[in-house]
Amino acid sequence: MKKNVLIIGTTTGLVSGEKLAQEKAIYVTLKSFQQAGYQTILLTENRELFPEFRTVATQIVFQEINLNNLKTIILQYQIDFIFPTYTANQNLSIFRNLIKQDFLQQHQVKLLVLNKNNLNLTISHKALTNYLQKQGFRIIEHQIVHNFEEAMAFVQQHHFPIIIRVNNKEQKTYWNSINTEEELAQLLATTTADDGYEIERSINNFKELTMTTIRDRFDNAALIYSSEDMDSIGINSNDSISVTPVFSLTNDMFQRLRDAVLKLTRLLKIVGICTFDLAVDEQTNSFYVLAISPLFQSKILPIIASTGYPLFEVICQVSIGHRLEQVTTLAGPTINAAVELTSNHLTARFPIWQKCRESQLVSNLGPHTSSLGSVIVSGNNLESVIMKGLQILDLTDDIFINKPDSKLDDEQIEALLFHTNIQRIIAVCEALDRGFDVQEVQSFTKFNLVFLETLKHLLDLARLLEYKKGNLEILTICKRYGFSDFLIAQLWNITTKQVAEITTQLSLNCLTLPTPSSFSLNQGAVNNYFTVYLDDPQPRQPNYQIILKNYPNSDMISNYEMSILAYQLLHQFQMDGYSVASEGYLLSKIDSSIVGDYYIDSDYNKSYLYEQQNRLNITINTLENQHVNYPISLYNLDYQRSLLAKQRVLTEISFIQNQEHKVWLSLPITSVLKRNTGQHWEMTAVPGKLNSRLVQLATEFVNKKLSHLTFGTLIIVDETVVKYLAGFTTNIGIISQVNPNFIDVLCHSLVGIAPSKSQKSKHLFGRKINCQRSNTGLYTTKVHYFDLPASYRQILK
């Protein structure tokens, strides 16, 4: 009899890159458990699923993830195992309550990965501190205080800055970095703490590292990931540039850290994955364990990009009892997942913020995460990795050309270095370009010293490049270190095309190299590639029939919707037998079963991060279609808001037409805009009925005016088409659920295959998106889904 495993999915609310990464992980998890012979029940609050979820999951339950619902589902579906690895941190208390109430043992349900001990240490900072002290680990000097006088006594002994948090045994609480007596007095006056406050010596000048381990139930364990942040402690790790592998520690210190995390992994009886946040004090040659997490965290995704390690497959296999050295991948081969991979190149994760380009960002970074996503790039040196990241973040112009801080005097620049602003890197580069000492800048900013030295090197190269215009030797050096044709063209005051023509005269070739490691996984690993300029001859690229290139923007909802669209197209192209390659960090190759190559980055010169459109370029090169290009645009929330600002209510219908001008229509989606304040608005989208009037209106408009378009979206107000888009909106996720084969029809139309007949609509639901803009220039989006009334559903049928 097959065992039933309950997979805990994602929650609704804040939309971020973390949620997208969790959805990708759940997709691999469903396939892994299915391949292992389990029946999978997915509990999720998210209604806009990756298309394959419905084919690989035995059952999908759309309910709020809480204690009562979890108990009900366990009993209803006779659950044998619970797999919570990709759930959110806020759900940990649910599992701890299940253990406390003895519910799991009474019903013979096994909780995978988590246990009572590692749950307590993950949830409670105080429990972790006490545990580490008992195990002989060095603990940061701390004390429980109840008033201002006790706090100042601690300060007199350890000096400012300090870290202070509300004392709580049961859960983690946010900490605050305090630099002055006034800040301390204000905090204590504006917060209430019945059990006092926990006060710590600040370690904001220490290096912050992340290490991830994997362990099986036979006590085989391995360190599978390590990275270091370019910002020091005091700034949330998700808001810092992080680079893997660790490159600025001594080997002795690295081995000490490795031994420590592996020891803790075994002591905590982790069966699966565990991530550790660590602080290193290089002056005293000591380190501290800051936090542990036995859940998946998206900040370790570079492990897939940098080594090809099939992370999600390994986690699943180990959790159900497989040995690390005998993990069966989705592709079929068995690999030794206990091999500690060390990549022979660098991979970096750059945080991105949801913001408008025109906004003046004044948001300071601190312990609370403010970035909602990230981009991943790889290169053979730190300079090229940094240049790729700055280019995608649209910062190269400000740093190397515009230099907005150049009008400030030295004292003003120095003042900016002390503030942990999102745009501080521009002031840092201005200071280095003026000749500020690197050590001095490091003492102000606490940035990683090697990172600052690399920035200084890049700025010196830019000055040299500008001074020696036309010098091919300098050009060659700059190309090796990641300078784009567009940046060089600006520095030389020529066109990008001219730079590209000059570059062809060099000995360098732009190569796409695989991301190998010093130890091989043999078969089953994920093949990723990154771009680099080398003297090696240009290899002949495979003749792919389909190439998907993605240029996402900073709007997290449009990134998520584009992923749904792109992955279904990718899946359908492969199902139809085409050879496929994908390019761009949003289309990451997340498991070993996907056929085709994945290119982490490309040599494109333009940043699309703050555009209104999320772009997917599809190049088709088949016998029937030679070098045909279809750019698919997905318009973001801000664009939809601008459409709704005048009408407040509008209907959109997406269409597809083939070469014979046969038209397929989606269900109409009606959107309503409600503005709560000038900075806060909400958009509600609900599917409607495709009646004969709408069919005639849409079909005639497409046939008469849009015969040149293969796909698009009609914007309708009062039964009149007021606008059309050569692409889709963020409602494509709803369309892909209520018209399950809509994207399949799109895929077939692109390659000239006669699409199948449309299916009846199903999976009906409504969606509400709340957007909140702050005075800092940042904004957040939260999504909530709701069931449609039974009477409404009956009408649509």
Image (tube, helix red, strand yellow):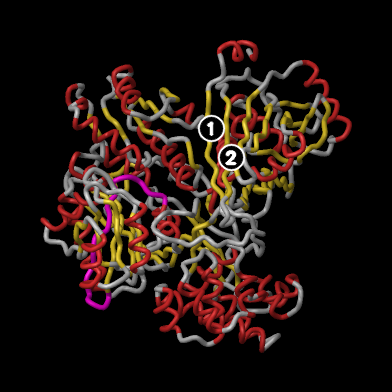
Q: Which residue is mark 1?
A: 48
Whether label 2 touches label 1, CB < 8 Å: yes
At x 41%, y 28%, the residue is: 64
Question: In the displayed structure, would residue 574 be above or below residue 2?
Answer: below
Badge 1 marks a residue whose secondary structure is loop
Q: Which residue is mark 2?
A: 561
Count up the numbered dots.
2
Q: Residues within 10 Å of mark 1 (few under 14, many from 20)?
A: many
Q: Which residues are magenta?
A: 282-298
Dot placed on the residue nearer the N-terminal end, 2 or 1: 1
Q: Position of residue 704 (x, y in %)?
A: 89, 31
Closer to the camera in the image, 671 or 543: 671
Residue 619 in view in this figure: yes
Question: In the displayed structure, would residue 18 be above or below residue 728?
Answer: below
Question: Marks 2/1: CA distance?
Answer: 8 Å
User: Which residue, as the protein is rendered here, is positioned at the far right?
Assistant: 704
| Callout 2 amino acid | Glu
The disc at residue 360 is: none
Residue 578 in view in this figure: no
At x 40%, y 77%, the residue is: 449
| Callout 1 amino acid | Glu
Task: Tell me where residue 682 sits by quadrant.
Answer: top right
Q: Position of residue 347 (x, y in %)?
A: 45, 63
Q: Position of residue 759 (x, y in %)?
A: 63, 19
Residue 78 lies in magenta, yes or no?
Answer: no
